[in-house]
Image (cartoon, grey):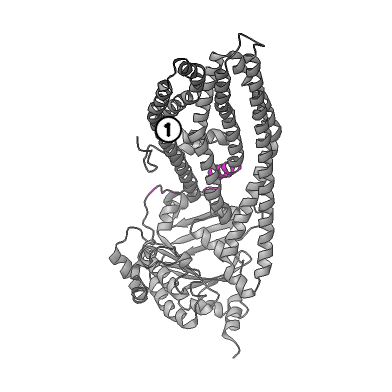
Amino acid sequence: MRRFLDLSQPELDTAGLQMTTRGLGPLRRLWTIFSVERPLMVQGMVLQALQAATYIPFTAGTQYLIDDVLPYCKQHNVIWPVGLYLLANLLLWPFHAWCTVRAFACSQMLVRSTVARLRRLVVDQLQHVSLSFIVSRGAGSLSNQLTVDLGKVETFLANMAGGFFVSVSIGAFTLMYLLWVNWVLGLAALIGVPVQLLIMRLMGKRIQLLQSKLQRSGDTFANRIVEFVAGLRQTKSFGNEDHMAAQLGATIDDLRTSGHEAAVANRWMMMWMQMNWQFATTILWCVGILGILGVWGAGMTLGQVVAFTGLYGLVTALFMAFQNAYEGWMTAEPGMTKLLEILDSDELEGYLHPQQQVELRGEIVFDRVDFRYPRSSGTVLEDVCLRIPAGSRVGLVGETGAGKSTFLDLVLGFYAPSQGQITYDGHGLEVIGRRQLRRACAIMTQDAFLWNIPIRENIRFGRPGASDAEVEEAARKAQAHEFILKTEEGYGTLCGERGGKLSGGQRQRIALARVFLRNPRIVILDEPTSALDLETEARLQDDLDRLCHGRTTFIVAHRLSTLRAVDRILVFREGRIVEDGSPAELLAMPGGHFARLHRLQAGPG
């Protein structure tokens, strides 16, 4: 069997695939992604058709056994024709089994490669959307869509590729056979079709609404459970377990109610469908008996009626396949719609790739910059005008919500100014590109984020191509080498989820080693020592001073002692820079905001 298309191959342009499907409905877009590998799809359909064609004789042969083999055996007092009938069935099974397994293998390859392709499209898109989109959606909702919703789509595709075409093929071949053998019974077999269509039309809209409600409940629960797990330490420290359990319990109850309503509605539709086809089977028996009695036509044999009712089950499978496909799509469609909302989002980061390669030195200029968040009317930063020479150390001071973090987000290109321009060594972001800018930057925060991978790989994340020797050298610079060697497996020790197996100081050391390895031109230190004790902070501060030497550095700190070695301090208040100068200059302003903060932290005397 041909290997499925490698997602890394250039011929599968995920961005191109996304653009060519944009504007189509969810089902058509899913079909477009599914049908990328047409040769494999055609191969699977041919095998499924053979699987269907070789299955019918097992049931259709019942008529031959009753009407021909049985009378012959009784007339000649022999049993060998029965053995011959059994042998014919047995000889057909190996070919039928080969077609079945090969068809299943093709369908599985198609389904799994389609789901992988869809995951790749979503993951690629998430790498390009803006931070505001991520924040507005929530980590829980996005993870729910990449796991639960994609799981529903995968189940739908697996049922369609593995069972739908087989059931349709078997049912279609059987129906044609029935119409050929006896057109009256063949038409009787179709009596339930209009009723089924009516049931689907009457109940479909309600089921779709209930599935959409279930989707929203699932997204809400996913967001809440992420918050719940992340905040367990805080919850326990306040003794608020009962309070959080009550809040989460309400979300769980909403999810339970939505799921119950959707499941019961689906079951009612299936029940009406089942009754429809069960009653149609009864009608078929009655029509057949009337045929045996000679009420219509030239009469029928018992073998024909038995074979017809047996084959009718295969015809029923044809229409049940459409019902199951409809029901499966009602379950998968809300999730697929959510995934397409991600793929179709226009909240993308522009200027990713550079127009020219620039060796950034670190000079940054804000020229009359205003900023407000998307879908928000309030201005977060207003009229920011300043020039930061390369290699400067700049401290950022201000109350919570004054605009410091937003200022740094603009420096890193996470957002674009609503008005004005930011240049780097005289070049706009459209020239140097966001990726080139960020490769010249490194950030270290108070909550050092570590992946649950070996310590070595967490450090290497600063420069993925670095050698083991370079990783260890960076660890020595961050004074992390010794404690790393004392861990269970040295540099191969897993850090735990979010670095949970390490202490706060150890996590910060590893994060610092990552920054040393990156060797950036622009460094951002966002409260890197606020969660540490004074002794650990003092030791780490010396290493941070060495890191910042010769690099453009922004330091956010509420402990003003952290800003002892900066060249310049920017004081933010309500989205504006209200003070700008060296520490000595700002301290010389008795009525200034920085001087007041310094007096408060210095204490009396």
Which residue sits at x=41%, y=72%? 509
**In the depicted structure, whether residue 605 falls above or below residue 234:** below
Occupied quadrant, residue 514 = bottom left
Q: Residue 244: x, y in percent? A: 66, 66
Which residue sits at x=59%, y=40%? 333
Left or right of 569? Residue 263 is: right
Which residue sits at x=46%, y=52%? 428
Left or right of 532? Residue 335 is: right
Which residue sits at x=47%, y=74%? 504
Question: What residue sits right under mark 1 in the picture?
Answer: 100
Q: Residue 487: x, y in percent? A: 37, 74
- Which quadrant: the N terminus? top left
Q: Nearer the viewer, residue 302 or 471?
A: 302
**In the depicted structure, whether residue 149 falls above or below residue 579:** above
Q: Residue 341 colored magenta?
A: yes
For the question of whether residue 208 can be seen, the reply is no
**In the depicted structure, whether residue 308 falls above or below residue 257:** above
Residue projecting furthest to the top: 298
Occupied quadrant, residue 335 = top right
Q: Residue 119 colored magenta?
A: no
Left or right of 201? Residue 517 is: left
Left or right of 513? Residue 256 is: right
Q: Nearer the viewer, residue 545 or 113?
A: 113
Residue projecting furthest to the front: 77
The type of residue carrying mark 1 is Thr
Magenta stretch bounds? 334-356
